[in-house]
Structures are given as C-alpha cells and as structure tokens.
Image (cartoon, rainbow, N blue to C red):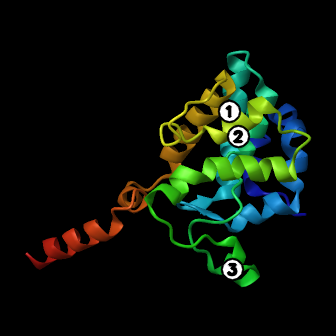
Amino acid sequence: MKKDQIISILESNDLFHEWYSYVKDIIASDEFQIRKLYPHHDDSVFHHCVLVSFQSFLIARKIHADHRACAIAGLLHDFYPKAWQYNEELAKISSNRIRGKSNLFHMHGFVHAKEAAKNAQKYFPDVCNSTVLDAISHHMFPLTIIPPHHIEGWIVTTADKLVSVQTLDVKMIPRLIGLGGVLDRFNMGERLL
C-alpha cells in the first residue's frame, strides 16, 4: 500500500507514532480506504477524518482527556455508509455507496452522525466504546440537538469544525445548507442587471 500524503505530512509531528498506534488498523482497512473516494467539500472523507482525528488527539492530550478515544472517534466521525456528494469514480465501483436525494431532516447534516456511529460499531466493534460512539453520534451538535455527553465528544466536535473551516470554500455554504438553487437564481438575476 502506497503511503498516503497526509500521513507522511503528519509523521513530522513528535506525537505521530503514538496517534498512529491507535488508528493504524482502521486506516489500513479496505472499508476506511474507500473513503478516499467519498467527497467531503473540496476534499475526501478519508483526508478530512485523518485531520480531525489527529487534531482531536492533540487537543485531548493537551487537556488530559482520553486521547485514544478522541483519535478513534475523530477518525470515525464521518464513517457513514453512503457518500452524500456524487463521485464518478465511486459510482463506477458501486452506485449503492451514493446517497439519493432526501427531505430536509433526512439530509446528510442531520443523519450522518448516527449513521457513522452504527457503521463504526459494525466494522470496528473492538475500539468503539461508549465514549467513542457518543462522540461520533453527537459531533454535529447543534444539528443533532443533543450535545455530546463527554469532553471527548466536545473535542471531536470542535476539531471537526476547525478542520472544516480551514478547508471549506465559503461559496459552497449555501449549497451545503440547501440554498444553492435559490442563490443560483439570485445570481442569474444579478448578472442580467
């Protein structure tokens, strides 16, 4: 297996080997590797989750929380079974891995945290304790309504937002919250003036 670029970048950190010892089996699994084909904004779910995992691990270590649980929960927080954005390469492998259109409360932002927790429990039951599953299930607070019950969940939630803000193209926000069509029509009208 060719070494991933993101892993190579993280190796320069003194704490890399400790973090990697907690997550290497998950990262190496075929089921996690396919997340390289799941789009996540302008990136992949694989890349995003590795960054959230490492950031969560570092924060937890700094404040003396369960850094192993944070590394695992951060890595699996977006381990949902179906991609919510289309990817041609993924569609060639299996169209069953791409989510169809949904109504508002069944859209990705509202449901993927619980889906990711179920999927994590299915594929990695040996590392998914109650703290890890709670962090995964509630990382989308306030969309999940119920906040995380443990500090580790708050750490993963925060790291997810920090990493997302760093990689998010601001122009994508309207589409992500379901206003893409409205703004497209508005922008069309603006061009006509």
N-term-proximal mark, 1 vs 3: 1
Q: Amino acid at mark 2?
A: Gly
Q: Real-space Cα distance between discs 1 and 3? A: 32 Å
| Mark nearer the N terminus (3 vs 2) | 2
Q: Which residue is mark 2?
A: 74
Disc 2 secondary structure class: helix
Callout 1: SS: helix
| Cα gap from disc 3 to disc 2, whole angstroms | 27 Å
Q: Nearer the viewer, residue 17 or 183?
A: 183
Residue 184 in picture, x, y percent from top left: 28, 71
* Residue neighbourhood size for the residue with mark 2, other residues' Cα within 10 Å, grouped as few (<14), some (14–19), many (≥20): many
At a point 81% along the width and 36% down the height, the residue shown is 16
Disc 3: which residue: 95
Tag 1 near tag 2, CB within 8 Å: yes
- In the picture of the structure, the residue carrying the numbered disc 1 is 56
Q: Residue at x 38, y 61 (%)?
A: 178
Kind of residue sitting beneath label 3 = Ser
Q: Quadrant of the C terminus?
A: bottom left
